[in-house]
């Protein structure tokens, strides 16, 4: 039974504390895009909270980057793709040095969480691995849905709550952990969000299917921050 202090808090709220570990969830699609890129093992994988600020302040740094983002800002780079897990799987490469992800809420939420000692990317695609890692934690754990308050992006809160349930229940029982993830997936499907994105986006059907593919991966990306407000590395 999990006894480590555990909380769920939106990234635009005041965090109850700034201790321990934070996990950020942007299921459709940032967290899953990062997972897909991360597992392709590029030499460097970065996140940024803003393409506009990069264009204004650090454009020379990204001229040879492959960028994944749904943001509308134009930016000089080697190649540009949507924030899409499907495109990430097809266009990530260990032979290209730098990949970067910048999104509307996911990457800003990750930068908001930089006050914590460690920050991880939360998803369904590595749900069991995340539970295994967090279940060993003795420090406080803060789960951060990236969706804006009162938005219809219910999937982030659903998965954060599923993680909390798994940690507070029988986190050492694989069937229980997988059941928590499966219930979260069902709730997301019932909400209609996957259907909406499938119809709205060119890659929406593929993206949502990948994002809901429980335990597709077994590793958890960690975000490493420095004093640079525009770039953080995914390790």
Image (cartoon, grey):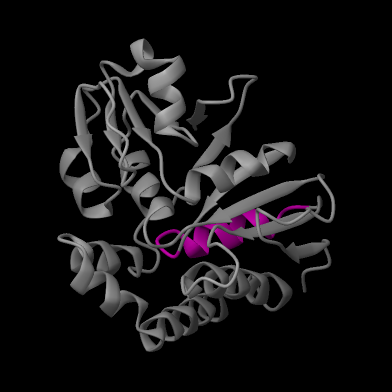
What residue sits 54% from the left and 75% below the top?
A: 158
Expressed as whole percent of the image width and height from the top left, the position of residue 102 reads 40, 39
- Tally the marks: 0
> Is-magenta flag for residue 135?
yes
Up-down: is 229 above or below 214?
above
The residue closer to the viewer here, 139 or 101, is 101
View extreme (top): residue: 60
Q: Quadrant of residue 3?
A: bottom right
The residue closer to the viewer here, 25 or 6, is 25
> Is-magenta flag for residue 53?
no
33 on left or right of 56: left
Up-down: is 93 above or below 186?
above
Q: Quadrant of residue 79?
A: top left
Q: Quadrant of residue 43?
A: top left
Expressed as whole percent of the image width and height from the top left, the position of residue 16 reads 84, 56
User: Would you say residue 220 is visible in this rendering?
Assistant: no
Expressed as whole percent of the image width and height from the top left, the position of residue 83 reads 30, 48
What residue sits 38% from the left and 48% below the top?
A: 35
View extreme (bottom): residue: 190
54 on left or right of 207: right
The residue closer to the viewer here, 20 or 78, is 78
148 on left or right of 31: right
Expressed as whole percent of the image width and height from the top left, the position of residue 38 reads 37, 40
Q: Which residues are magenta?
A: 124-137
136 on left or right of 90: right
What residue sits 76% from the left and 64% below the top?
A: 7
What residue sits 62% from the left and 74% below the top?
A: 161
Up-down: is 57 above or below 214?
above
Quadrant where the N terminus lies?
bottom right
User: Would you say residue 115 is visible in this rendering?
Assistant: yes
């Amino acid at each position: 039974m999990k006894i480590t202090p555990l909380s769920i808090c939106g990234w635009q709220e005041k965090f109850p504390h700034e201790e321990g570990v934070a996990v950020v969830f942007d299921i459709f699609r940032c967290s899953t895009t990062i997972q897909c890129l991360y597992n392709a093992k590029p030499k460097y994988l970065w996140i940024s909270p803003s393409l506009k600020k990069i264009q204004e302040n650090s454009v020379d740094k990204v001229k040879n980057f492959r960028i994944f983002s749904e943001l509308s800002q134009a930016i000089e780079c080697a190649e540009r793709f949507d924030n899409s897990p499907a495109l990430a799987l097809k266009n990530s490469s260990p032979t290209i040095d730098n990949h970067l992800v910048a999104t509307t809420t996911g990457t800003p939420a990750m930068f908001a969480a930089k006050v914590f000692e460690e920050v991880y990317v939360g998803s369904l695609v590595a749900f069991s691995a995340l539970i295994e890692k967090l279940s060993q934690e003795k420090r406080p754990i803060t789960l951060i849905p990236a969706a804006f308050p009162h938005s219809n992006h219910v999937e982030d809160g659903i998965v954060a709550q599923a993680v909390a349930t798994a940690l507070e229940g029988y986190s050492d029982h694989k069937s229980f952990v997988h059941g928590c993830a499966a219930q979260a997936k069902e709730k997301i499907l019932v909400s209609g969000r996957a259907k909406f994105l499938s119809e709205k986006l060119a890659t929406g059907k593929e993206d949502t299917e990948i994002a809901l593919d429980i335990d597709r991966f077994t590793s958890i990306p960690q975000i490493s921050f420095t004093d640079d407000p525009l770039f953080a590395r995914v390790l």
